[in-house]
Image (spheres, rainbow, N blue to C red):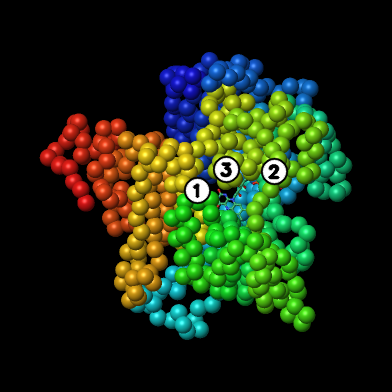
Amino acid sequence: MVVAAAAKAATTTTSSWNHTTSIERRNKFSTMAFLRTLDNKGIMKEKFEITLKSATLIQADNRTFTTTATTDENYDFDYLVIGGGSGGIASARRAASYGAKVAVIEKGRLGGTCVNVGCVPKKVMWNAASIAESLHDMKHFGFSGYDSDAIHFNWNYIKRNRDKYVLRLNKIYDCNMKNSGVTPILGEASFVSSDSIRVVPSNPDEEAMVLRAKHILIATGGKPWIPSGIEGIDEYAMTSDGFFELEELPEKAVVVGAGYIAVEIAGMLQALGTDTYLAVRKGCALRNFDTLLSTTLDEEMQRHGIQIFRNTNGIAKIELSKDDSFRKTVYFQNGDVIDNVDTVIIATGRIPNVDTLHLTNANVMQTKDKYIRTNEYSETSTPNVYALGDVCGKVELTPMAIAAGRRLADRLFGGIPVLPVSYDLVPTVVFSHPPLGTIGLTERDAIDKYGIDQIKVYQSKFSNMYYGPWQVEAEDKPKTAMKLICKGDEELVVGLHVIGMGADEMLQGFGIALKMGATKADFDATVAIHPTAAEEFVTMFPWGLSNQISGAKHSPLNNNNDDDDDTTTNSQ
Ligand SMILES: Cc1cc2nc3c(=O)[nH]c(=O)nc-3n(C[C@H](O)[C@H](O)[C@H](O)COP(=O)(O)OP(=O)(O)OC[C@H]3O[C@@H](n4cnc5c(N)ncnc54)[C@H](O)[C@@H]3O)c2cc1C
C-alpha cells in the first residue's frame, strides 16, 4: 500500500531562524511537501504540495485507479464539481491540493444546505432555545427574575446576527476555495454529454458556456419535499428553508412531519415561546430510530408542552381565515383540525436536487426515488462521472458528504489507494429537546439481522443529576435513557442509543469505540467519569460480568493484564 510506503519513506524536517518548517515525504508515486512559515507580520502561512508522477496506475482493494493530476489539454478542467456544498467543496479542494485543475459550479450560496439552511443556522437556533430552557430552569438553582419583565427574547436580533454569521461563512468558503486553487463558477449546471457541462451563469449579463472535464462530480444535494395537490399548501405553508427566513417568533405554529428536521424545529419553537403543534402521519415521530429514543422523545416533547397530533394520515387542506389576521386553519386527513395558526411548517422529507441536471444526456442512472445510483466508490453508471452526498440518499449528513468527497479526490488525483468511506456505524445526533444520539443498529434491526438468541440488550433510564435539587416529583423530572445492543458471546456492541442532556457531545467518542469493535467488556473496563450522564454507558448493569476474553484487553478484570494488581471481579 502506498500509505504504508509513505510512512516508511525518508522524512526530512528543517527548522531555521525565520521559523520556516518543512516536512517532505516521498514515495514511488508522489512527493508530498508540507511548508509552514511565519511571515514578517508574524502570520502563519501553511502550504501543502504534492507532486505526482503522471498517470500512475495504482492497485487498491483489487481495483485500479489512475492518478490524473496532470492537466489534459483536451479538457477545460481535470475535475468539474457541480454543487458548492459540503461534499462538493471538500472534494474540490482536496483534488486541487494534488495539483488537479478544478472548478466548482454553484447556483446558489456557497456552503450548500449545511451552511445556509441546515446544520449551521439550525444549531444557532438550538443554542438560543437551550438558553431559553436554562432561564426557565434558573429558579430551581436559586435565581429569581424569570417571571418578571426583565427577560425578553428578540427573535429578529438573533436572526439578523445568524444571517451575518452565515454570510461570513459564505465568504470564507469562497476564500478557501480560491486559496486552494479551485475556480468558483456561479451558475446552474446541466449535462450536455458525459464530459461536457453547460453553465447558465447566475449573472444575467454573462453568457452561457459549455465546459469539458475529464472527471465530473455531482454533489447537488437535496431539497425539501412538499406533498402536491393539497389545497392551500403552496400558498400558506413553508418548508425548513422558510423557517430560517422567519423574521419574528411565531405565536402558534404547526410542524408537519415525523423526521429529525420536524422534531428539531418543533423543539426549538416551543422552547423559544411558540405554542407548538407537531402533526405526525402515524403514531409518533422518529419511528426509524430505536423505540427507546422515539418513546422517550415523545414523552419529553409533551413535557415541554408540544402538542402532538397523531395518526393524522397527512394534511387535507390549509385555509386562510376570513378575517384580516392572516391566520390559517389546518385540516388533517383523519378529521383533526388546528385553527388560528400563524405558521405552518412542512417537514415531510427531502428529495434529491436533480431536476435541472439533464442526467439522461450523460446516461447517469437513478433509483426509483430519483437518487443517483452509485457504488461504494461514488462511481455512477457512467465512467468518469461520480456522485456523493445527499443526492445519493445514503447517509444524508454533512460529515458523510465531506468524507466521501475527500476520499474520492484521494483516489482520483492523490494516487492514494484508500478504501471507500464506510457508511456503517455513523454516529448521528438529533438536536431535539433534549438531544439524542444514535450509532449502529436499533434493537429491532439487530434482532432481524442476527437473530434474537444472539442479541443482549443493556438499558437504563434515569433523571440527570442536573435535576437532583429540583423540588418536583420524580416523575416530573426530564429523563435520560440509554441502550447498548450487543451481539454474540463476545458481546460486540452493534448499537448505542442515548437521549438526554449532553447526548450531542457524548456520542463522538463512543463512535470511535464502536468503529474499533468495542465489546461490553471494553465498556466496563473503562473507568467512569463521575459525575456525568455518560458514565452510565460504562457502568451499565450488570457491570463487569461480560465475557472478558475477546474484549477488554486492558481490563483490570482480566487476569492476563501485565500490570495487574489485586483487583478482583466486581459486580453491581
Ligand atoms: C434543516 C436541516 C438541518 C440539518 N442538520 C444537520 C446536522 O445537524 N448535521 C448534519 O451532519 N447534517 C445536517 N443536515 C444535512 C446536511 O445539510 C446535508 O447532509 C449536507 O449539506 C449534504 O451535502 P451535499 O454536499 O450533498 O449537498 P448540499 O450541501 O445541499 O450542496 C448542494 C449544492 O448544490 C447546488 N446545486 C444544486 N443543483 C445545482 C446545479 N444544477 N448547478 C449548480 N449548483 C447546483 C445547491 O445550490 C447546493 O448549494 C441538515 C439538513 C437540513 C435541511
Q: Amino acid at mark 2?
A: Asp
Left or right, residue 570 beside residue 279: left
Q: Gap between marks 2 and 3, in whole Å?
A: 15 Å
Is disc 2 in contact with disc 3, using a CB cutoff of under 8 Å? no
Tell me: 466 left or right of 234. Answer: left
* Relative to 305, residue 507 above or below: above
User: Badge 3: how crowded within 10 Å, few (<14), some, or many (20+)?
Assistant: some
Q: CA distance from mark 1 to mark 2?
A: 23 Å
**Residue 369 tag number:** 2
Q: Is residue 344 visible?
A: no
Q: Is residue 61 visible?
A: yes
Q: Is mark 1 within 8 Å of ligand 1?
A: yes
- For mark 1, what is the residue? 428
* Between discs 2 and 3, the one toward the N terminus: 2
- Residue appearing at x 42%, y 44% in the figure: 495
Of the numbered discs in the image, which one, if any, rests on residue 395? 3
**Hey, which quadrant is residue 364 in on the image?**
top right
- Could you say where residue 86 lies in the image, as x and y percent from the top left? 62, 44
Q: Label 2 near label 1: C-beta < 8 Å?
A: no
Query: Along the line of sight, which residue is nearer the eye, 305 or 73?
Result: 305
Instruction: Tell me which amino acid carries mark 3.
Output: Val
Residue 46 percent location from the top left of the image: 53, 36
Question: What secondary structure is marked by label 3?
Answer: loop
Which numbered disc flags the more N-terminal residue, 1 or 3? 3
